[in-house]
Amino acid sequence: MLDEVLTAAQEALGEDLHAAVLFGSAADGQLRATSDVNLILVLERFSPARVEALRGPLALAQAAVRLSTMFLRRDEVEGAAGAFAQKFADIKRRHRVLLGPDPFADLVIPRPRLVARLDQVLLNLTLRMRALYVARGDREEQLAYLVADLTGPLRTSAQSLLELEGRPAASPKEALRTVAGTLPGDWAPVLARLSEAREQRTLPPGVAGPTLCRLIELAEAMRGRVRALPAA
């Protein structure tokens, strides 16, 4: 499916296509049936007339493999990394170039930006989880889907946190396990539920709600550590 998308992109965009980059779980061999496939098309310029030809192939790929595509101009890479530092820190760690040069090879994300953005991401996750628990706490099937969707952001946030603390982890999954292991209580069952939800999109009866509550605690604890970090 990616080959078909890349062929269509080359034909439609021509010299406007600078690079195509896969990132996230698909790039590091951790793709699951419930995972999105994340693609960045780095462009010299964004031409509405040219990208219109990609609507069909991208819609087909989105339906078939949950392809999500970002259109990023080459001159926007540095600005995007500053504005969305947490996301681009993960992209820099986990990406695979499919076409063209590596647009992130020399990317440096300023530490103050990453600290500030990570704090913002974790606060947003916390607020979102609280609201979803209140709104959907009695709908276990929906909560299981939410737990699956929250796994990725929590893991990548943990990896950024450990890097900022000077002890990088080998993978987002290992990073979250390491962070949780430093907190009071037994987090192993919670982390096991995350993997179960991510791989199967379902959880046993009576489990999704308590799991989401523990994830709120985890995000709050991680944010507390981020706020204790030196910005420089």
Image: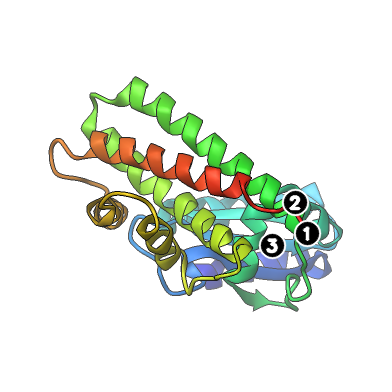
Describe residue 197's horizontal placement relative to residue 97 as left or right. left
Query: What is the crowding at mark 3: few (fewer than 14 residues within 10 Å), some, or many (at least 20)?
Result: many
Mark 1: which secondary structure? loop
Q: Residue at x 65, y 68 (%)?
A: 92
Q: CA distance from mark 2 to mark 3?
A: 24 Å
Q: Is residue 8 visible?
A: no
Q: Which mark is residue 113?
A: 2
Where residue 135 sits, quadrant-wise, is top left
The answer to whether the residues at label 1 and label 3 have Cβ atoms under 8 Å apart is: no
Residue 212: percent from left, percent from top: 32, 38
Mark 3: which secondary structure? strand
Does label 2 or label 3 sit earlier along the sequence?
3
The answer to whether the residues at label 2 and label 1 have Cβ atoms under 8 Å apart is: yes
Residue 174 position (above or below residue 145): below
Callout 2 amino acid: Arg
Query: What is the crowding at mark 1: few (fewer than 14 residues within 10 Å), some, or many (at least 20)?
Result: few
Callout 3 amino acid: Leu
Quadrant including the C terminus? bottom right
Mark 2: which secondary structure? helix
Give the residue pinned by disc 3. Answer: 41
Give the residue pinned by disc 1. Answer: 110
Residue 73: percent from left, percent from top: 80, 57
Q: CA distance from mark 2 to mark 1?
A: 5 Å
Residue 132 position (above or below residue 198): above
Residue 39: percent from left, percent from top: 59, 61
